[in-house]
Amino acid sequence: MEHKININKTARFFTFGNQETAENIWIVLHGYAQLPAYFIRKFNTLDPEKNFIVAPEGIHRLYIKGTSGRVGASWMTKEAREDDIQDNHAFLNQLATTLLNKKSYKKRFLLGFSQGGATASRWHNSGNFKANHFILWASVFPEDISFEADENTLNVSDNYFVVGNEDPFFDGKHDEVQQVFAAQNFNIQIKTFDGKHDIQTEMLHEIAQECETK
């Protein structure tokens, strides 16, 4: 028989930029088997005086290969997934409260990459960060999200879906994904770049500049 208890757990997050001068805050969620200490480097070409980047770490760590060597982190697996979803939301809500109590920002960005896109989507839909700009990068919306017009935060945020034209996880699926987005009530801009499964600097800057004018 399965039993459960709640425990306290230490969760990490990494930052880049000057929190005191920043006008914008970005919360960026890494992909499967990545570490935020390295993932956050993808954003270090954004102006650090204007942008404060926060990269939380998925609360499950794993050895990438075998039982030793390089370590990565994960947001969840299929096992006890509902518990992991609630734990992720509790962590991210507490993090957002801590950050936003210290300072208000002109714009709030939420970006989810790969596996982190599903966690970012769920949190954007029911969490407390209330991003102005939501970027789903090389990921798809999880099937358990409700897109009812009156409840979905995607109806009030500025939304992007970004994917490389050589991304092996989307090979031959670009048209299918675009049709899924087109069928929703909310607006989402679809952007592609020349590249694979990664955060591409030029596209990141293009989106950041577009959002500055909105």
Image (cartoon, helix red, strand yellow):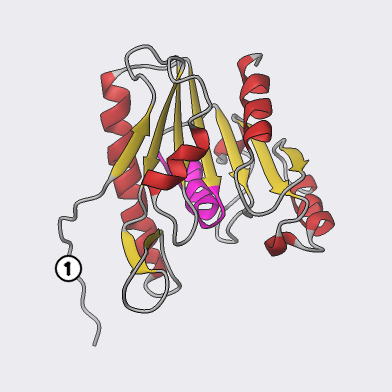
Q: What residue sits right under mark 1 in the picture?
A: 5
* Magenta segment includes 125: yes
When the figure is inspected, residue 155 is found, relative to residue 180, above or below; the finding is: above
Q: Residues within 10 Å of mark 1 (few under 14, many from 20)?
A: few
Q: Is residue 1 left or right of residue 31?
A: left
Residue type at numbered disc 1? Ile
Q: Is residue 51 left or right of residue 143?
A: left
Magenta segment's dominant SS is helix
- What residue appears at the point 57 percent right and 35 percent down from the top-left corner? 134
Which residues are drawn in magenta?
Answer: 113-128
Q: Is residue 214 left or right of residue 8?
A: right
- What residue appears at the point 19 percent right and 55 percent down from the top-left corner? 9
Q: Is residue 73 left or right of residue 163?
A: left
- What residue appears at the point 71 percent right and 63 percent down from the top-left corner? 168
When the figure is inspected, residue 26 is found, relative to residue 115, above or below; the finding is: above
Closer to the camera, 194 or 145? 194
